[in-house]
Amino acid sequence: MMQFLGKVGAVLLGLALVLAVCLPVGAVEPIKIGVLGPMSFTQGEGHWNGASMAADEINKAGGIKVGAQARPIELVKVDTNEFLSVPDATNAIEMAISRYNVDFLVGGFRTEAVMVMQDIAMDAKKIFIGCGAAHPELCTKVTKDYDRYKYWFRLTPINSKFLGKVDFILLGTVGAIMKKTLGIEKIKVAIVAEKAAWADPIVGIAQKLLPAKMGMEVVGVWRPSPVAKDCTAELAAIQRAGAHIVFTTFSSSVGLTFAKQMGELKVPAVAVGINVESQKSGFWEATGGNGNYAVTINTYARVEITPKTIPFYDKYVKLYKEAPNYTAGTYDALYILKEAVEKAGSVNSDKVLPFLEKTDYIDTAGRVVFDKSHDVTWGPEYVTSIGTQWQDGKIQCIWPYHWEKVFYKGTVPFKMPPWVVEYYKKKK
Amino acid sequence: MGLVGMYFRRTMGILRKEVLVLPSRVAVLVFIVALMALPIFTQDYYFLRVMILTSIFAIFAASWDLLSGFTGQMNFGHALFFGVASYATALLNLKLGLPPYFSIPLGAVGGVLAGLVVGIPCLRLKGSYLALTTLAFPIILTGIVFAIPDITGGELGLSGLSRLTGSRVLDYYLASGLMLLLGFAMWKITDSKTGIILHAIREDELAVRTAGINTTRYKLLAFCLSGFFAGVAGGLYAHFMRLAGPSGLEVGLSFQVIIWAVFGGMVTIYGPIAGVFILYPLMEVLRVVLDQFPSLPEIRMFIFAGLVLLTLLFMPEGLIPWVRDKIEVECPRCKVRNVLGRQRCRVCDAELD
């Protein structure tokens, strides 16, 4: 009998030891953050990469201090597949909330999908920092129905109204330089926008604004397909029309084709505007160097927007072998959340909310202060976004260049394509 | 009490003689009971959302079968009916303040009108010409949606619609109840004299016309009926998602409905319903499974496509007809179905092969 009891005791002791070794003593509950995005696409990758980088850094530094306890971040990858299916996106966010019990949400890209995901997050009273969709309506909802939509914030990109503003500032800046250096009296502009709904308002405004407010002449509007493989007909017509500037509005692959062929044909004009393809690291190789001198609005470049930009940019390139796109702003979203949670001493949305509203944080893209609609404030001293130009194989920041006293260290002057200078010198 | 007893005995009689004699009918009974009992076991928000969307898409897939499967009018732009109804429902709800129980049926009338708009010019078209023409309609409507953003909300769509019922469990019962009801209605239509004519139009339209039947009228009827049922699905979707947007008109949705219907088995009504009930939750199962392997790339769509392709390769008539043929046999004399293994037909007593 004693022998039997001894055996049972030994087994129990062994079990206790195994449990003691296996179970983490006083395991700290992580703070779960759902990263929403179309993970099979570059936008989703940007969301995930930015958030992963921030989570690693924060965890290595001890995590987020909630009261007396330091809690690590656990990221939950939420593939919304929103390009292909809006219902899929809603299922994904519902799962993140109800199954994984995430404390916060960051990301989102396609506006229509974000609208529905926003509603689901608001139903669950979860703070959702948008890092992808630019439509102003997402934030207008906060002012219209604060009690319901107060948990929504947008960090990146700047809203489409300000994107449009920067677009025209870039156009005006390049126009002024051309006027001065080439002695052109009246700048002629060719408006070239991909045939897509989002580009329509820009075209409409440009047609009115350029002659009426900016003293420029519109020589024509061209609307190639977003996936056009040949733009030579448009480029020939633009050249015939005598345009000095080509005002581009491209988010799709046509941006690559257009920039490549414009360089190949040495069209005596400068391309300025939105060209998402030219924001990517692979643009130079993809155009065989012919995309040289293309100017676009951008969020990141290797320039000192804030002291955090270059370290972030370099580390991102080192880790992921590409430049960060704007959806990588999830990096900043996590730091902003960290600050608000630490001040609140809680992960409860209602407790974190007032501190998030009072955010005044220098992130990698500028100084973040949320306005009444929980949108990021745009302008000098805040987030401005930047203008970049490809200059001999390097993507360089060319704007703001002493605009409204804003100058980011590392910004270089805009470079005129040499064949444009030559063309107008000969013409004289 | 006697009346209740009589109904109970009659129900049991039907169950014993009509339902329990065939495995496929037992499966349908089990499916209905399970569907109705589900919220007793779980009220998980995520799970119920998936099941609500499954029911909505099941109505949508069955409505495609009603038109394209039964009548042979190959519609590659079925999202048009869904999208028109969802926009109509949203406008009725947002502009006129109509509650869902008015806006959804009235929105479905929008689907009927869309059926007429598509049906009339397509009456003389067949095969690939018809398929391509129907494909064009939702694309045209998407253009219109973007052209008048003041009314349609442009790329954002129309948001902020009233909730279906305000409770996830009630939403579930409404969607699944309507799915069962409308699925049964569609099945009864195809099982009626009208259904036989629709069958015949698909097989040999000329012969049907020779028999003195106005095929034009029946084809238009199929377009309108299909538009109505797809419209109910569109209206339910708009109120459940609280949004009617351009994604409801996308080509991808039109193809998705064909995949569901063909996978489940065309010309059956219940086949497409089963197709959605297998494939739609399967995508979510894949999401859960793949979440355990974060290092794996996002290959849900790839696995989904591979599975559908393999199924259709080995089961060209769809999954449900294949399964049914494995467990049941048709009487060579009276065409009534019997459970596999029976020696003689349960109705005419003919010898079964």
Image (cartoon, helix red, strand yellow):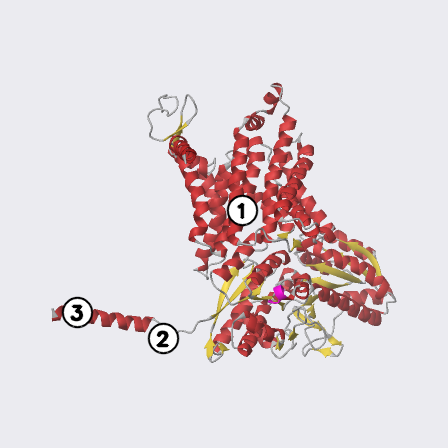
Would you name the residue on which mark 3 appears?
Answer: A7
Question: A349 or B265, which is in the foreground?
Answer: A349
**Residue A148 is one of the magenta-drawn residues:** yes
Q: Residue at (54%, 35%) from the top-left corner?
A: B185
> Marks 3/1: CA distance?
61 Å
Chain of the residue under the numbered disc 1 shown in the image: B
Q: Which mark is residue B174?
A: 1
Chain of the residue under the numbered disc 3 shown in the image: A
Q: State the extent of the magenta-drawn residues as a range.
A: A147-151
Can you give x and y, in whole percent of width and height, for residue A201 in the image?
A: 75, 57
First of labels 2, 3 by sequence position: 3
Chain of the residue under the numbered disc 2 shown in the image: A
Task: Find out whether the residues at labels 3 and 1 contact each other: C-beta distance under 8 Å.
Answer: no
Q: Residue at (48%, 54%) from the top-left corner?
A: B47
Q: Nearer the viewer, mark 1 or mark 2?
A: 1
Q: Which mark is residue A25?
A: 2
In the picture shown, does residue B334 fall above or below A33?
Answer: above
The lab-note entry on whether marks 2 and 3 share a chain reads yes
> Marks 1/2: CA distance?
48 Å
Can you give x and y, in whole percent of width and height, for residue B201 in the image?
A: 58, 26
Question: B191 or B256, which is in the foreground?
Answer: B191
Q: Residue at (43%, 43%) from the top-left corner?
A: B33
Q: Which residue is situated farthest in the top direction here? A: B211
**Residue A251 is one of the magenta-drawn residues:** no
Q: Quadrant of residue B178?
A: top right
Identity of the amino acid at label 2?
Val
